[in-house]
Amino acid sequence: IDDDTIHDALAVNLCRCTGYRPFVEAARAACRGRLSLVPTRSSEPAAVQHGDGTVFHSPATLSDLLQVRATHPEAMLLAGGTDLGLSVSKERKRPAVVISTANVAELRRIDETGDAISFGAAVTYTEALPLIAQNWPSFARLIRRIGSRQIRNLGTIGGNVGNASPIGDTPPCLIALGATLTLAGPDGAREIATEDFFLDYRKTALRDGEVIRSIRIPKLNGGESFRVYKVSKRYDQDISAVVGAFRIARGNGSVSSARIAFGGMATTPKRAAAAETAFGGADWTEDAFAAAGARTGEDFSPIDDHRATAGYRSKVAANLFRRLFRDLDGASEPLEVVRI
């Protein structure tokens, strides 16, 4: 391999301010075999020993994944690694055992029926995007903002859910859409509503030995609309301050049903119950939408952090209801500024 090939592979992947020389040197060393993975004798599926002592498993079936998971309950469960990878690169943590889900056949499936689409937990954003764009265009626009093409080629919705971050971009969408998760473990499979999966900060309903197998998202019914709005310091590739997701049904000049969820407003992604109640049978007017938005103060008590203050988050969450009305009502004024 030559330097031109290395530089071509690095293009766009790295921030220029880091300096490319260490990465080029690392690539040269890797290509000379210094950092290659060396197979070890193991009865467990697809185990390899990395040069720094980390054991890496890449099972090909769900049963193999559950077997390795049971043997190594402390292992890092790795999907795309677009988030967990930071613990290695930034915090210098070296996990003793890593289990990759990337090659598990059952987790790579996409199944579509007349009323829903089921995405395996290891399906990447790029692979899911065409069907998401077809059925929930607003959701697709959010995914395109999550990261660069390289990130979308590796990152997974299952990983975004399993990571259980309160500012994860996809969970509010899944909650608002009424998505369910299929969890697989030693005792078989079970289904759970996405909103019930998040118990507390970074704490989930996964039992010992369980993994997320798939995410089933219902399609919209007649008269329903879905919108999601992400507010962040920059438009692309940034951590969200607030994400608001809305599944709204309109009938006879009023709001006939509403499912609303927010991220960045609590220790978990969470439904806006008071706002949903305020929407029940409300007239399809901007004042009614604003009144429902005002009820978010009953649902959430956000915190101050480096991304936004609690007051800013609360105001933004309420104002998104006005944006929702204007969006659904075909407002002529621009609702999203991408560039100046």
Image (cartoon, helix red, strand yellow):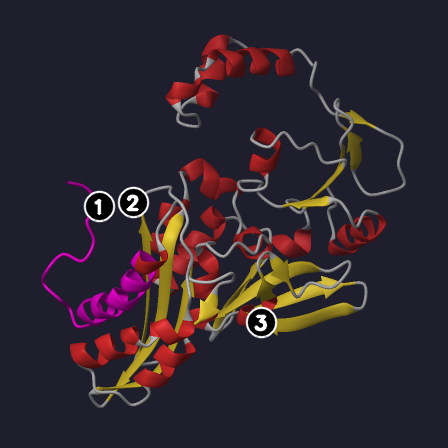
Residue under label 1: 338
What residue span does the magenta drawing correspond to? 312-340
Question: In terms of sequence position, does the residue under pointer 3 or pointer 1 come before the other?
Answer: 3
Q: Secondary structure at mark 2?
A: loop
* Depth check, front residue: 34 or 275: 275
Q: Secondary structure at mark 1?
A: loop
Q: The residue under label 2 is which amino acid type?
A: Tyr
Query: Residue at (66%, 66%) from the top-left corner?
Result: 205
* Depth check, front residue: 36 or 195: 195
Q: Residues within 10 Å of mark 2 (few under 14, many from 20)?
A: some
Question: In terms of sequence position, does the residue under pointer 1 or pointer 2 come before the other?
Answer: 2
Q: The residue under label 1 is which amino acid type?
A: Val
User: Do residues under tags 1 and 2 come within 8 Å of each other at their CB atoms?
Assistant: yes
Query: Residue at (76%, 31%) from the top-left corner?
Result: 54
- Numbered disc in front, either 3 or 1: 3
Specify the farthest residue to the left: 332
Residue 174 against residue 276 in the figure, above or below: above
Question: In the visual, does 169 lie left or right of 324?
Answer: right
Q: How many marks?
A: 3
Question: In the visual, does 95 lie left or right of 241?
Answer: right
Q: The residue under label 3 is which amino acid type?
A: Asp
On whether residue 92 falls in the magenta region, the answer is: no
Image quadrant in which you'd find residue 204: bottom right
Task: Determine the CA span between mark 1 and mark 2.
Answer: 6 Å
Using the image, tell me which numbered label, if any, was put on residue 235. 2
Residue 101 against residue 214 in the figure, above or below: above
Q: Residues within 10 Å of mark 1 (few under 14, many from 20)?
A: few
Task: Determine the CA span between mark 2 and mark 3.
Answer: 30 Å
Residue under label 3: 196
Residue 221 shows up from this direction = no
Q: Secondary structure at mark 3?
A: helix
